[in-house]
Image (cartoon, rainbow, N blue to C red):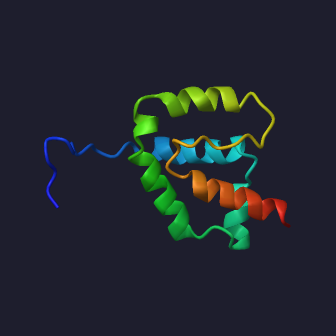
Amino acid sequence: MHATNEEEIKPLGDEIHHYWLAVSMAKAAGIDAQAALEEGRLSQETWAGLITRCRGCAWERDGACQRWMEWALTEDPGVDVPEPCENRDIFEGLRQGQKNE
C-alpha cells in the first residue's frame, strides 16, 4: 500500500527515548515490567513490539504523553493508562495479571 497525501509517513522516534517512556508508563501504571519479563507474563517479542508502537505513536509525537507522564509519576503508582496510548491494552493486561497473583 502506498501512502497518499492524507497518509503521511512519519519516521519512528528514538529507540532509547521510547524505551524509557515505556518503562515510565509501566511504572506510572503500577506495573513491574522487569518482573513481568522474568515471570514470562511479558515476552521479549511483545516488549519489543511495545517499544516500536510507542516510537510511532501520534499521542507521544505531539508531546501529550510526556506531559501526562510528568503528572502521572507524581501520583501513586497504579493510575490508568490513557486511551490514546498505543500500548494501553498491553499495559492494562499486565496490570490485571499482576493483581491476580
Tell me which corner region of the image, top left, top right, bottom left or bottom right, holds residue 72.
top right
Where, quadrant-wise, is the N terminus in this rendering? bottom left
Residue pictured at 45% horizontal, 37% vertical: 59
Residue furthest to the right in view is: 101
Q: Position of residue 18 (x, y in %)?
A: 48, 44
Q: Is residue 62 above or below residue 77?
A: above
- Residue 78 screen position, x and y as percent: 77, 43
70 left or right of 31 in image: left
From the viewer's perspective, tell me whether residue 4 is left or right of residue 33: left
- Rendered view: 97 above or below 3: below
Q: Residue at x 71, y 69 (%)?
A: 38
Residue 85 on image: x %, y %: 53, 44
The front one of 74 and 35 is 74
Residue nearer the viewer, 65 or 20: 65
Q: Quick check: 4 above or below 46?
A: above
Q: Residue at x 50, y 29 (%)?
A: 64
Q: Quadrant of residue 98?
A: bottom right
Determine the residue positioned at 76% across, 64% down.
Answer: 97
